[in-house]
Image (cartoon, rainbow, N blue to C red):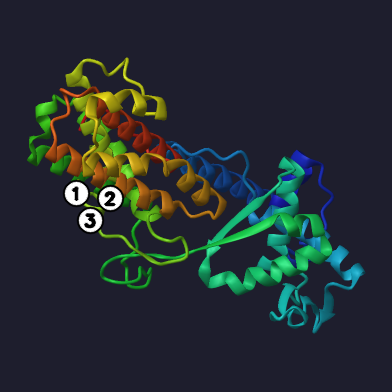
Amino acid sequence: MAAQEILKKDKGWQPIIDYRQYVQGKEGRLEEVREVYGAGLKWSLEYFETIYKRLGTKFDGYYPESWVGEYGMKLVEKGLKMGVLEKSEGGIIYRGERDGLHTRVFVNKLGLPTYEAKDLGLAMAKYKDFQYDLSINVFGKEIDEYYKVVKAAMKKIEPELGEKAYHIAHGMVRLPEGKMSSRSGNVITFEWLLGEAKKRVLEIIEKTDRKAENVKNSGEIAEKVALGAVRYALLKNNIGNDIVFDFGKSVSFEGDSGPYLMYTYARCKSVLRKSKINETMKPFDSAQGRQFNNETMKYNPEELSLLRLFYRFPEVVSEAAATFSPHLLCAYLFELAQCYSLFYQKHTILKSDFRLALTQTTASLIKRGLFILGIETVEKM
């Protein structure tokens, strides 16, 4: 009822669910409950915002279950009239067997909306606010079959919304020791995870000779590298697979990790700073290739490897976006960083404009690729 009051006030909502029948004799406490609900909602969202700010993430709207349940009930009523949904044993169900699925309950015997009805309502509520062309719904893969039923019902009740709904199933994040469980006490929070990653990054920086770069604001750099480590560790795997989060591998400056890519970028920038043409050098293009032909005459294997990778970047980004597969871009960036590291080890760069152009292009592509993944680069590490 507290949520209904907020909807009535903010959105002019006409309540559908009669919650008063469940609080008979306790009406005198409704105002107290309403205040507690409002305060709890406000505090929760404010706390989440501190995490989102740290992540550099922004949301344009929030849809609490108590709100979308009301929207969902409106669609359930429409589904009943259309014959899509039906009453059964005091509740309202969708018989998914006719679609090769299974039956699910949308309203229970108490007359209250279930998660199924709420997900119908969520689609409707979001569309009223944003008129989207595509709604990407991200859930755990454990509820794949559940959402197939919801979408089947939605496509019949609100065909336009049903066609615009797309489901991405993600795996679960696990520790090397096994699955996290609140019962066993081995559950970790995001803040602890990021804090621990930041601490370990700082330790690595302190123990290496990277201080020779005269890095300032090591705390700020460690924060960015830690964020990059966590993000990359989650994105480099196929979204549908479970992820084993290993701190040793995730925060390492070597191997397939976010810090390794960020360090490769910083290494490129260091080379370009030493060349003193960092501001005038442009990323490599085909015209430069013809220009540099006279200088190099013949590319060595490491140069050829980089050139071949450069031209794949747009294709990889397009495929990753079209298939909702960020791990494809992660794999490309790791391959690019490996190729550049080998090139860096085997060849003198500063005396060749061509090799400086390869370095500048590598830096540009790593920065652009990491930006797409939500990872901010640093100039020095």
Q: Nearer the viewer, residue 179 or 296?
A: 296
Mark 1: few, some, or many residues within 10 Å (few <14, many ≥20)? some
Asked whether, in this view, residue 288 is left or right of residue 42, the answer is left
Q: Which residue is mark 3?
A: 249
Residue name at image x 80 percent, y 55 percent: 160
**Residue underneath mark 1:** 254
Tell how many labels.
Answer: 3
Q: Is residue 107 visible?
A: no
- Residue 323, percent from left and from top: 54, 55
Q: CA distance from mark 1 to mark 2?
A: 7 Å
Q: Which residue is mark 2?
A: 257
- Say which element carries label 3: helix
Place of residue 39 in the rendered image (x, y in percent of width and height, measured from the top left): 57, 44
Is label 1 or label 3 in front? 1
Would residue 98 be seen by someone viewing this image from the given angle? yes
Amino acid type, label 1: Glu
Q: CA distance from mark 1 to mark 3?
A: 8 Å
Given the image, on which type of amino acid does mark 3 rest?
Lys
273, 233: nearer the viewer: 273
Q: Secondary structure at mark 1?
A: loop
For residue 369, which quarter of the picture? top left
The mark that comes first in sequence, 1 or 3, is: 3
In the displayed structure, 347 sits above or below 288; it is below
| Residue 80 position (above or below residue 345) | below
Instruction: Determine contact: label 2, label 3, CB under 8 Å.
Output: yes
Residues at badges 1 and 2 in contact (C-beta under 8 Å)? yes
Residue 126: x and y in percent read 70, 48
Q: Residue at x 31, y 32 (%)?
A: 363
